Image (cartoon, rainbow, N blue to C red):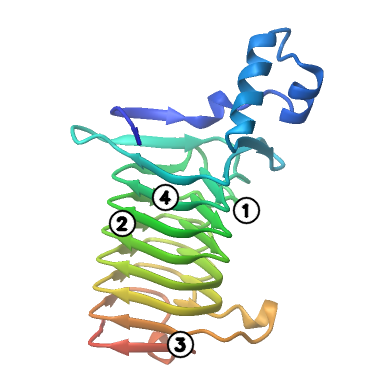
Amino acid sequence: VIILAPGQYNLSAYAPEQSLEAIVGKDYYNDDEDMAGLYKSLQDKGITWKYVGDGYELCLTGITNLTIQGPPDGPATLLVDPRYAFVLKFDDCHLITLKNFIAGHSEGGYCDGGVLGFANSSSIDISGCRLFGSGTVGLGLYDVSNINVASTTIFDCTYGIMQIWDSESITFKSCLFHNNKEYYGVEIRNAQNIIFDSCSFMNNQGPMFSDGSEYFGASQNSIIVKNSIFSSNTDTNIQNSPHVTFENCTFK
């Protein structure tokens, strides 16, 4: 369990100044062998830095049973500088719990780099978090299953609220999505058993539920939205979204 103290943490301050492969291969880091040993040790534990075009992205790979949580007595904020990087990227990770912290980028960006990204992962719980733009999206979920997101806010993202691709069994409960732009709200591609329950969608731009068919071709999706509120979004045709079933929802 990692419990964050109150404060602001720019993860980019801990990134290497050159590729991890170069650091480990040459066994030095700015002439400091101890630093090379540290990065090699982190790599062995599944913690690496990946170059993404304008800096480094922190990647957690092959990790099971990890909790990262904010403090009970004040906010903790995780930031990164590169606009092409996710703040935290998980690959092949399972039984992950993230709760009660804020995350986003120090400056806005486009093209890539969301806030929290998960690939080839399962059994993820996210609660009480505030994910802001930029990232391009608050959540990137790719080939994942058994994801529960509760009491979490996604706001001010520059491309959309989230992407859900090739995934199943994902539930959002009592979440708020507001002031996100500009290409889509929720982009869902080949995703099954996706549920939004008691959520609020406010002041978002773009089609609220996009299947990405104009870019990727037709996909099979199954989405249920219930007990939720849609207010002041630019999409005036939300109720006719493909593959979406609405139950007891309010549209304003």
Mark 1–mark 2 Cα distance, whole angstroms, equals 22 Å
- Foreground: disc 2 or disc 3: 2
Quadrant containing the C terminus is bottom left
Mark 2–mark 4 Cα distance, whole angstroms, equals 16 Å
The residue carrying mark 1 is 112
Q: Are marks 4 and 1 in contact (CB under 8 Å)?
A: no
The residue carrying mark 4 is 96
Lower position in the chain sequence, tag 3 or tag 4: 4
Say if 98 sits above or below 4 in the image. below
Q: Could you say whether the residue bearing mark 3 is in a helix, strand or loop?
A: loop
Q: Position of residue 204 (x, y in %)?
A: 40, 68
Q: Amino acid at mark 4?
A: Ile
- Foreground: disc 3 or disc 4: 4
- Foreground: disc 2 or disc 4: 4
The residue carrying mark 3 is 241
Q: Pointer 1: residues within 10 angstroms few (<14), some, or many (20+)? A: some
The residue carrying mark 2 is 152
Q: Pointer 4: residues within 10 angstroms few (<14), some, or many (20+)? A: some
Lower position in the chain sequence, tag 4 or tag 1: 4
What residue is shown at x 37% (from left), y 42% (from top)?
67
What residue is shown at x 74% (from left), y 14% (from top)?
28
Mark 4–mark 1 Cα distance, whole angstroms, equals 23 Å
Q: Amino acid at mark 1?
A: Asp
